Amino acid sequence: MCGIFAYLNYNVGRERRYILEVLFNGLRRLEYRGYDSAGISIDSSLPLPATSPLSNGSSSDSLPPLVFRQAGNIESLVKSVYEEVATTDLNLEESFLVHAGIAHTRWATHGEPAPRNSHPQTSGTGNEFLVVHNGVVTNYQVLKETLLRHGFNFESETDTEVIPKLAKFVFDKANEEGDQTVTFSQVVLEVMRHLEGAYALIFKSQHYPNELIACKRGSPLLLGVKEFNEDMSNGPSFHDVKLLTKSGQPKELFLSSDANAVVEHTKKDGAVSILKFDHGKGKHSGGLARPASVQRALSILEMEVEQINKGNYEHYMQKEIHEQPESLTTTMRGRLIRGGSCKAKTVLLGGLKDHLKTIRRSRRIVFIGCGTSYNAALAARPILEELSGIPVTMEIASDLLDRQGPIYREDTAVFVSQSGETADTLQALEYALENGALCVGITNTVGSAIARKTHCGVHINAGAEIGVASTKAYTSQIVVMAMLAVAIGSDAISSQSIREATIDGLFELPSKVREVLKLDHEMKDLAKLLIAEQSLLVFGRGYNYATALEGALKVKEVALMHSEGILAGEMKHGPLALVDETLPIVVIATRDPCFSKQQSVIQQLNARKGRLIVMCSQGDAASVNVGGSCRVIEVPQVEDCLQPVINIVPLQLLAYHLTVLRGYNVDQPRNLAKSVTTE
């Protein structure tokens, strides 16, 4: 949930003002993830005198780094930094040939949003060690109690503060024992050995000027490399830090928990001097852990800077809703086959082709996800059951873990996550792997933890999604799972006609979504009528039960209005008691096998003077508008299994316009973050 950004220039002269702006802009690129406070650290100017108690006796020791932290948004941090600089002698025009700066956006998990709880967290007076952190240290209380006994004072309520203090403890102990050559990486590796949980960390220390150490366990972290005087497309791969420092080649390094903060600087994504840490194999006897180095070549990011700009739209969510015809086209590109010599209609999912036989032999298929990703899987479940003939069960990741639900070797477990880094889903993946299931990943993020750890999978290729409330990723997830159903069922003659109709429907889907987007103004008018309402019910059934859940979730997430998605078949088992002439109710009644049942639901709600908004297929208004009292939204009709893709778009637009009209931040909803990387 938090955002990490760091910038190191090597043999590239940069003024302090420039360095500050790079750090601030990096944080701005991370705003969409959700945050409540922010902070940065940059270097002071003058070296410490050799007589200083913080000095090692070397004139190379620097003054303590400067730390700036602020609750609220990034612009509040920027303003406070420049105000503080104005009251000091700090020279913004001072140039650094080498400089390492770190920055952070925080989403509160331990301690309220406040400067003392913001990052960077420090080892204490003097800022000898500083850390920015994404994730949770699950054993921080034990570590804190130990450090308190050793005389450390804590100023924050965060779990993070134990990390820099533990680094200082390790460093001090090494020096007390006469190890004057202890390296920064050795200090950090020893700290890691004591940490439990999932995290991404960047360390900065005055004892190791111009150095940054980054490490991760389970949380995302990316390194970008920008070289000067060298052809970016033909540059060498770096496998060792010596190539970075001893060659003297000018370069800039960018560390981030998200590619969005890196792509404007470089498309080179890589890792330099990466150490793979193993708790069980570290050499701990009498010294610090020194695991073997592993090499990773540089790769090229496919994302372009343009993908993370709003363009002509006012908000990212608005842009991403209207991008869905293009994102769906990209999701299906190269995967749908129609025509050819035998006029075959098939689906090709390269990431699954070697595992389809195993999936077809599964005892059951288990979909596992959270939030919107869970809803997308729920929308796809009926077509997967129909085409595969395999029982399909649904699991919310956290609930599966809480009750330790049974997962068998004969199961296929499908993990659905937009980011590929969702903490609960990742833990459920580890659980399924331990139980021997075939694990399939469906994510929007190449190189994410779920993409790496599953046996096989499919990238949805929806493009960068910046708005916290998922829109285009949701519809692309449904399409990928519909294609998965077609691929699994491709050996059954009995379902050939359904498969071919689904493929035809997939080809037509982008144009149908483009058509339904024309309801934008109509949904804005509806939002104006609902602006003062406190609650909204959404009834769905069959394929569109998931649409009811997702539509209600969108309104809940961004418009901050209570909304509830309800299975229409459960209406008389409690929810009917809520119906009166004031409560707005959306009923999804497009043409499918449940249509007549939804007509009955509309009749019963109307009989109780329900304030109805009915979504129906084009031409069906007269069939659903009982007594002429309903507000009707007509949408294009497509194949039943693809109708949820069409039906969610008006509800996305409604949620968007409600939020804007109510004056809330549509891209960064209160208390929410894009990637939920903690439990």
Image (cartoon, grey):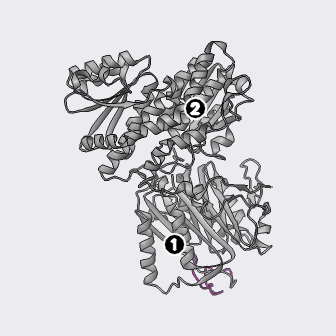
Magenta portion: prevailing SS class? loop
Q: Vertical placement of 75 versus 442: above or below? A: below
Q: Nearer the viewer, residue 168 or 533?
A: 533
Q: Nearer the viewer, residue 98 or 436?
A: 98
Q: Which residues are magenta?
A: 43-56
Mark 1, residues whose alpha carbon is within 10 Å: few (<14), some, or many (≥20)? many
Q: Residue furthest front?
A: 341
Q: Nearer the viewer, residue 659 or 643?
A: 643
Q: Indicate yes or no whether the magenta region holds residue 47.
A: yes
Q: Vertical placement of 48 versus 385: above or below? A: below
- Which residue is labeled 2 in the image? 507
- Residue 143, given in percent of the width and then of the height, sits at 57, 55
Q: Nearer the viewer, mark 1 or mark 2?
A: 2
Q: CA distance from mark 1 to mark 2?
A: 54 Å
Q: Indicate yes or no whether the magenta region holds residue 15.
A: no
- Which residue is labeled 1 in the image? 67
| Mark closer to the chain start, 1 or 2 | 1
Q: Residue at x 33, y 40 (%)?
A: 523
